[in-house]
Image: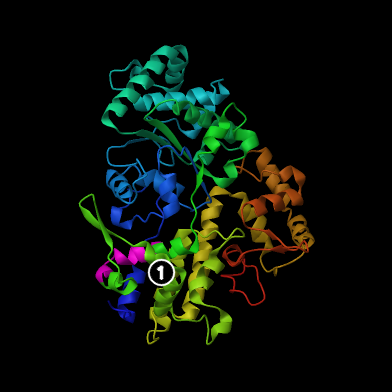
Amino acid sequence: MSRTIDVETAREALAELPEGTSHGDQPPPPPAQVYVPRSHLKALQPDNLLVTGMRGAGKTFWWGALQNEAVRTMVAQQTDRTSMGEKTEVRTGFGVTPAPEEYPSKDALRNLMAAGSEPRSIWRTVQARQLAGDAHELRKRRSWPERVAFVDDNPEVIDRLFHERDGECDRRGAYLVILFDALDRCADDWKEMYRAIRGLLQTALDMRAYRRLRVKVFLRSDQVDESRIADFPDASKVLSSSVELSWPRRELYGLLWHSLANGRHGDRFRSFLTPHSWSTLQAGGQSVFSAPRTIFKEDDQRSKFHAIAGEWMGRGPKRGFPYTWIPNHLADTEGRVSPRSFLAALRTAVVDAQNQHPEHGYALHYDSIKRGVQEASKIRVSEIQEDYPWMDRALTPLAGMVVPCAFEDIAERWRSKGVLERLNEEADQNEVKLPPRHIEQGPDGVRTDLESLGVFLRLRDGRVNIPDVFRVGYGLGRRGGVRPVRER
């Protein structure tokens, strides 16, 4: 086994790291690019109906990847407990990709609810359409209002359809799973979104009565407000099956090792990373190398990464250590890191090292790592803006401030810039999607929302701190911290 990796090989491999995220409007990733954290294996099992996670945790990634039979085959080979294998049928009930024949668009869904259709009926219609064969009466209905009306008017026909399809799947020993994602796109305000989610979870509970039919719902963590979405009988049975997609530090580096081990220089990296044999999985005609669990020991991960990045974030240990420094500076207030931002930081860092420090003795230079975090901060800000457009209104006016700071200083900045007035106007006129949930409580309400999203941290003395991953992207300062990308 080689205990070192030459600088040029490491730089070439790091520059080719994948983006680490998949959108529903893109083709599913090849199996070799799919890394499965241990906690995610549980989330992928059919009987776990509800999957939650922050923005960027992998909800839409898995919504898209599970539609790929080769990926399901690879997942099934990594554990004896999952039933999400090659024989599993996977359908989509809602998602980021428009599919008007498979499920209603946001506007169609809004019109259905405005016309009096209950969300549970709408989602049951979507699921029935996924189960119905071409000759079924439901397939002859050309519009969603017609389809919902048919399902409402013919409950016995629909019950029989579900029962028959369940029997067919049971005889084959396979599950049929219908995936739902991007539920924030089903409405423009919180009330209607919660209403739609509540109805969907009711159908997920209904599906539990069958042996082989399942619904799997991917939700953002802030969408799981139990008082709004789980106030129906036996809702606890759905909530108890909830699994959160998490990325602890060892799994972030596991993603890195997997990407390097399956990349162009994979043979060298497999030899460098561990003396133990790697499992070879076969999926979609590809060989996928899976790391042994011994590679996830913290001391081993640290030593291997420092062989690539150097031991210190400066000329001595006082500046910190790359292995912990990178995740710490990419984390929100809950310690959560987006895998996309982690890989982006490394890709940017290696390009900078190649250009600015070509003769450095390691593949990465500590100054380049800092620039990588700056770039990753912009990516993380862009990610969260997609889900929460109002956040840009709230944080952009804070540019130039230094944290930690008194919340009164932030509230005064908001007042002087007319931030809350603008947010209230946009909410009243439906100009902004899903405004702050507690905006009616004024500055304190917006503070509560930013805290729940991991952007604001309330210190013991009441002051506000903002993690580097957001602070840098929005141009705020902190004594001794990473410099902002730019002043806004």
Residue closest to the eye, 428 or 155:
155
Q: How many marks?
A: 1
Is residue 181 visible in the rendered image? The answer is yes
- Quarter of the image for residue 192 reads top right
Q: Looking at the figure, which quarter contains the N terminus? A: bottom left
Residue located beneath label 1 in the image: 347
- At x 28% / y 46%, what residue is drawn? 73
Res 92 seen here: no
* Residue 130 is a magenta residue: no
Q: Which amino acid does label 1 sit on?
A: Arg
x then y, percent, for residue 367:
50, 80
What residue occupies the far left of the structure in this picture? 285
Whole-percent x and y of residue 284? 23, 49
Residue 262 drawn in magenta: yes
Which span of residues is magenta-colored?
Answer: 255-267
Compared with 415, 342 (above or below) is: below
Q: Which of 205 and 471 is in front in this view?
A: 205
Name which residue lies at 66% across and 46% down: 436
> Residue 209 location in percent, x, y?
44, 25
In the rendered image, which quarter contains the C terminus? bottom right
Helix, strand or loop for the magenta stretch, by majority: helix
| Colour style of the rendered protein structure | rainbow
User: Is 29 left, or right, of 407 in this rendering?
Assistant: left
Q: In this view, does 181 lie above or below 307?
A: above
Indicate whether 411 appears above or below 488.
above
> On the image, which quarter does residue 276 sit in?
bottom left
* Residue beneath the point at 50% across and 60% down: 248
Q: Which of 391 and 293 is in front in this view?
A: 293
Q: Where is residue 95 in the image (x, y as percent from the top left)?
A: 43, 39
